[in-house]
Amino acid sequence: MARLLLVLFFFSVLSTLASAGSWSTQDLESRKDDLYPEILRDEAVARLNELGKVSDAEGYLERTFMSPASVRAGNLIRGWLEDAGLRTWIDQMGNVHGRIEGINATSKAILIGSHLDTVVDAGIFDGSLGVVSAISALKALKARGKLGNLLRPVEVIAFSDEEGVRFQSTFLGSAAVAGILPASALHFSDKSGVTVQEALKENSIHTSEENLYNLKYDRDSVWGYVEVHIEQGPVLEWRGLPLGVVKGIAGQTRLKDPMSAAAELIVLLESLCKHPEDFLSFDDHCKDSTVQSLSTSLVCTVGEISTWPSASNVIPGQVIFTVDVRAIDDMGREAVIYELSNRMYQLCDRRSVSCIIERKHDAGAVMCDDELRRQLQFAAHSALHRMSDNQFLDEVPVLMSGAGHDAMAISHLTKVGMIFVRCRGGVSHSPEEHVLDDDVWAAGLSVLAFLETHM
């Protein structure tokens, strides 16, 4: 009898384990169904590749403010926004908008966005990934029949200009929405003499100084801004993680310098930016902590050089070059600019040449909102947990951004937060820019997880 009971107990345990295993498999399949790989990965990757073919140039990717390719890309994005169930429009600065009102149309709106323009010879993920990830997440909600369950409005914005390639002035699109774009920006001209206002008019957008200010969003109508972007650095790849969240964004200054003696000046710049501690003195305006911050965050780039008369056997009479200086510490960045300017003028005096330094762009460092950062960190962790059977994932890392983003301009309007996505080798602004398909998936899923907390 005891033996019979033991056998019955053994079969009961097996049955229970089998049943548990069966439920575990069903739960896993149910969880996989919630990941929407056909929308968040397959379709998103296809759309990124499709956008990557929309270019003004043959053989490489280039889309600048209101160029033919930029307009085509905007129309493509607008179609995708409508496919996701959003109401769409294009504003007076060429930004493409898509909005769902949710349960309460009068609540403060969540803005999610990035830019649709590119640098010259660009990669396909910078900017576009943030726009496509947001659209994909909302489409996944639509597929689930939950799009109307959002507690507040959600608006996706594809900004018309972040890179500043055509008019040498960054954030034209996002600065207009934030209300910090000066009316004088309409009169900035490109190398062909076409102004911002004329470029808009060529595309049937009639923008005056008066209606430019109408683009500014009411601060009380916006809850916050979220941007997904490739890291443009190697940290996530080093750590073997697809996603991170951003703590802050480095401030930046762009200078334009028409002068001779350029070679010596550029060498000076390199020395100053590599070893700021050898050039900056400690005083009330530049403390030891500032110099220490510069030693790890200061980045200087000479990205554009032109000479005149530009003949191989003639010493140039004039050289114009640009300098981009970035640092997390605004005071440190200003100290570098001050020291660089002083030494440039001294060098030019010594060489008896004329020097002119023009500040073309300034943006202070921006710190992301702590609470929004925690929400995005939770969403990213949730997305990675849902994608993986490993329940002991490392905490999603918090990173600083050395690159500029539309979030910098929008920070003048509302609180901002950013999710970074791993990119191969940290390479950006290059055809070598690359993001794994599954990391595109993780990006979209993290936006979805964030939106689910607002339902």
Image: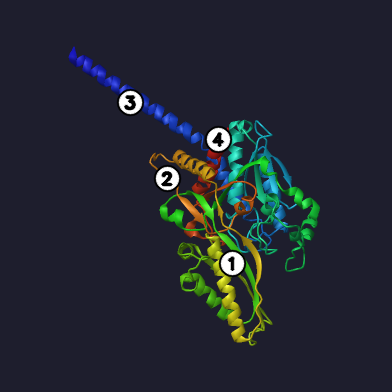
Residue type indicated by callout 4: Glu
Of residue 374 and residue 160, the one placed in the foreground of this image is 374
Residue pointed to by mark 1: 324
Q: Position of residue 258 (x, y in %)?
A: 66, 76
* Element class at badge 2: loop
Identify the residue at horizontal 66%, vertical 35% (top origin). 107
Above or below: residue 428 compared with residue 39: below
Residue type indicated by callout 2: Glu
In which quarter of the view is residue 182 placed?
bottom right
What is the C-alpha distance between the residues marked 1 and 3?
Answer: 63 Å
Q: Which label was assigned to residue 452?
A: 4
* Whether label 3 touches label 4, CB < 8 Å: no
Q: Is residue 446 left or right of residue 196?
A: left
Residue pointed to by mark 3: 17
The quarter of the picture where the N terminus appears is: top left
Q: Position of residue 163 (x, y in %)?
A: 63, 59
Residue type indicated by callout 1: Asp
In which quarter of the view is residue 42 placed?
top right
* Element class at badge 4: helix
